[in-house]
Amino acid sequence: MTAMERYLEQLRGKRVAVIGIGVSNTPLIRLLREAGIDVTACDRNSRESFGALADELEALGTALRLGPDYLDGLDQDVIFRTPGMHPDTPALAQARARGSVVTSEMEAFFEVCPCPILAVTGSDGKTTTTTIISQLMERAGRRVFVGGNIGHPLLAEVPAMGPEDWAVLELSSFQLMTMSRSPRIAVVTNLAPNHLDIHRSMEEYVTAKENIFLHQGPEDKVVLNFDNDITRGFAEKAPGRVTFFSRQGGDVSGVYLRDGTIWVHGEDGRRPVLDTADILLPGVHNVENYMAAIAAVDGLVPDQVIRDYARTFGGVEHRIELVRTLDGVRYYNDSIASSPTRTIAGLRSFREKVILIAGGYDKHIPYDPLGPELVEHVKLLILTGATAPKIRAAAQAAPGYDPAALPIVETEDLAAAVAEARRRARPGDVVILSPASASFDRFKNFMERGQAFKDLVNGLEEG
């Protein structure tokens, strides 16, 4: 009997609740029902919003609990929470006190996965780094399953996995909060204040991230950003092997940058791996993403594969993605930038000052560090959304702020912001959507926001 079969067998005869009928949990609901397990699917949205999916789930024998009272009276034996729900939400705390076991799709995956797991977390760069790692391993001839916070949930794919395969995951702080297992190889790209609308404090956010390596064994590896004070400090707690990467700190044991070349310093000495001039992706933050990936796959992927890949990889959608050039103006979609640090990295990717469209849902994180970057890198700031006042205040409080050099405009919505950028842009300008904020005030997620921006830009007429 496989680990997956044993896991499902343990659930038979128990009542299971799955909170959230979304991307992560819909395949889980199907998997559980196909195994004959009693499932109640709970979601705050109405039945009408699910359309045919609600009919499908009920046809499978799933009980639906929908609407504003979806968390009332949770008393199932096992409860799978949606990744974005705090594990100490009162309804979950009460259910736990009544004897319920609260878990998640990702925790179950770690328990039953038959192959080694490599996982990436951090405040910025997770998706690009995860993509680079997974595609490098595939080019090296390995069979890779990609999932977690990127792609799709992998629990339902476990039966197709073998011990020689690799699972490469992007993990959010919400997924990591209650994890009691860690991957074979863990990567932490960086850490800065983020998601403080859900996390009770920065300390809780950092503690969640630590779970990616705290449960490793002595032969496992954690890759840490030496240039980030928080992640550098993680080394003291790591039970496994520590590999640093550093763009600024010079020679470290691991991966470092010297004279425009990424070097590896390992047990077999030092060797150059990749010239930064060969990296097609713009921006120093992508140099760091490559350094983290190189540290992770060292010994698994030949250096020549890395060099060939870097010359051709054009990036991931919604990450400084060139949408179009119209009348000499380049329009970029950086909707993934849901925090100030991510927007700062995007702004530093361009030589010229840009027209920036920013603003969105308020995650209760500080915007002060963004102010000086706006003054240095932005020629016109167009704001929309709940965080517009905070971003405006950060710019106006920054040293050297000059309203004539950095005019600030607030618009009603994204469509109005794009129209304003179009009206003001001149040949040679760069217009970039890099919100420094989450999307939840007006969009389901950053992908929907990015697609809306691309549709608006592609709908602009020439002339």
Image (cartoon, rainbow, N blue to C red):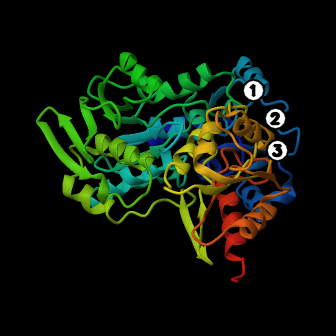
| Position in image of residue 139 (x %, y %) | 29, 61
Is 300 left or right of 200, judged from the image as shown? left
| Position in image of residue 12 (x %, y %) | 60, 39
**Tag 2: amino acid:** Leu
**Tag 3: amino acid:** Arg
| Position in image of residue 137 (x %, y %) | 31, 54
Q: Nearer the viewer, residue 401 or 432?
A: 401
Mark identifier at residue 71: 2
Whether residue 321 appears in this view of the structure is: yes
Residue bearing the label numbered 3: 44
SS at badge 1: loop
SS at badge 2: loop
C-beta proximity under 8 Å, tags 1 and 2: yes
C-beta proximity under 8 Å, tags 2 and 3: no
Is 397 left or right of 282, judged from the image as shown? right
**From the viewer's perspective, is residue 363 above or below residue 342?**
above
Mark-to-mark CA distance, 3 and 1: 14 Å
| Position in image of residue 392 (x %, y %) | 76, 41
Whether residue 12 appears in this view of the structure is: no
**From the viewer's perspective, is residue 264 above or below residue 98?**
below
Mark-to-mark CA distance, 1 and 2: 10 Å
Residue bearing the label numbered 1: 89
**Tag 1: amino acid:** Thr
Farthest residue toward the bottom?
Answer: 463
Quarter of the image with the N terminus is top left
Quarter of the image with the C terminus is bottom right
Mark-to-mark CA distance, 2 and 3: 8 Å
Asked where in the image residue 399 lies, by quadrant, the reply is top right
**From the viewer's perspective, is residue 364 above or below residue 352?**
above
First of labels 3, 1 by sequence position: 3
